[in-house]
């Protein structure tokens, strides 16, 4: 239950809430190897998320500088005696040099970490800045590395996608549906330009949707037979896969309301006195 709640919170990018759920659960069950392992993986994912945000700031700054620099240069050229404009342009020039370095550092770190999509974005943004501020040797080296890495990753991704499709065709479980959802989230837009990758990605998406519908319907049948708790045991874990599925959310809310009423009735004393 705690793991599911934490996973649902994480899927909604509620990182602090997920962290509190994990730490609270570990306080109660400090010897749980499963909790310890899941929390360790969670911390790694959160650190990557935070590092991503820092890199995104550099990308946003670089994109802004690409558009800002020629405009500021034109302002200075039109009125060279404008001290404010000249000072601002000088500051922007220094900022451009630093941002170019930050973006190349982002590219290098991302390549080493195997985060190809991020590396490509940082390199692409850096390449749009003034070439004078960039290490041409490093640029060439990074481009060569990324080309090789992208081809290798696409091949691995195609293999993994095919394996998941075959696994889902054998039957649907929370585990394989969740792995399929996570795998799809890692597929970069550029991967989908590969015809085989796109075809398999579409097939996996279809299998995931079919599997979700299958599991939701299994829960609905249990619910209709009065097995409400069993239905919830299927539906609640599915929220970590599809947190925005309104139909699933409504089913869960309805089932919880019914259970609450049943519990209330069972705790209500009989109005007819016993003999």
Image: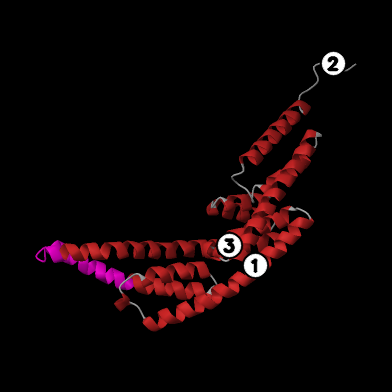
Q: Position of residue 249 (x, y in %)?
A: 64, 40
Task: Identify the residue at the far right of this view.
Answer: 275
Image quarter of the C terminus? top right
Q: Residue at x 68, y 48 (%)?
A: 238
229 vs 146, nearest the viewer: 146
x 75%, y 60%: residue = 167
Q: Identify the residue at image location x=76%, y=26%.
A: 265
Query: Is residue 21 shown to the viewer in this render?
Result: yes
Secondary element under disc 2, as helix, strand or loop, is loop
Residue for badge 2: 273
Q: In this rendered view, identify the residue nearer to me: 113 or 74.
A: 74
Q: Are marks 2 and 1 in contact (CB under 8 Å)?
A: no
Q: Which residues are magenta?
A: 77-98
Residue 1 x %, y %: 69, 49
Return the residue at label 1.
158
- Confirm whether the magenta stretch covers residue 90: yes
Tag 3 residue = 186
First of labels 3, 1 by sequence position: 1
Q: Secondary structure at mark 3?
A: helix
């Amino acid at each position: 239950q705690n793991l599911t709640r934490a996973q649902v919170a994480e899927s909604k990018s509620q990182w602090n809430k997920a962290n509190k759920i994990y730490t609270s659960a570990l306080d109660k069950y400090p010897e749980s190897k499963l909790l310890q392992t899941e929390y360790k993986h969670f911390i790694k994912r959160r650190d990557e998320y935070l590092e991503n945000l820092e890199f995104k700031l550099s990308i946003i700054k670089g994109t802004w500088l690409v558009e800002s620099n020629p405009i500021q240069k034109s302002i200075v050229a039109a009125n060279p005696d404008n001290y404010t404009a000249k000072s601002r342009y000088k500051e922007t020039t220094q900022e451009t040099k630093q941002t170019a370095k930050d973006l190349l550092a982002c590219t290098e770190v991302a390549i080493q970490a195997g985060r190809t999509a991020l590396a490509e974005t940082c390199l692409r943004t850096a390449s749009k800045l003034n070439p004078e501020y960039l290490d041409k040797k490093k640029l060439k080296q990074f481009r060569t590395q990324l080309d090789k890495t992208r081809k290798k990753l696409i091949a691995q991704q195609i293999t993994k996608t095919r394996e998941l499709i075959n696994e889902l065709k054998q039957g649907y479980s929370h585990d394989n549906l969740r792995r399929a959802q996570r795998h799809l989230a890692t597929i970069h837009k550029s991967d989908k330009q590969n015809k085989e990758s796109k075809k398999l990605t579409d097939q996996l998406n279809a299998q995931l949707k079919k599997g979700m519908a299958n599991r939701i319907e299994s829960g609905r049948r249990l619910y209709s037979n009065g097995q409400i708790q069993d239905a919830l045991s299927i539906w609640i874990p599915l929220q970590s896969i599809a947190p925005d599925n309104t139909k699933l959310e409504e089913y869960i809310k309805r089932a919880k309301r019914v259970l609450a009423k049943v519990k209330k009735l069972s705790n209500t004393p009989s109005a007819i006195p016993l003999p």
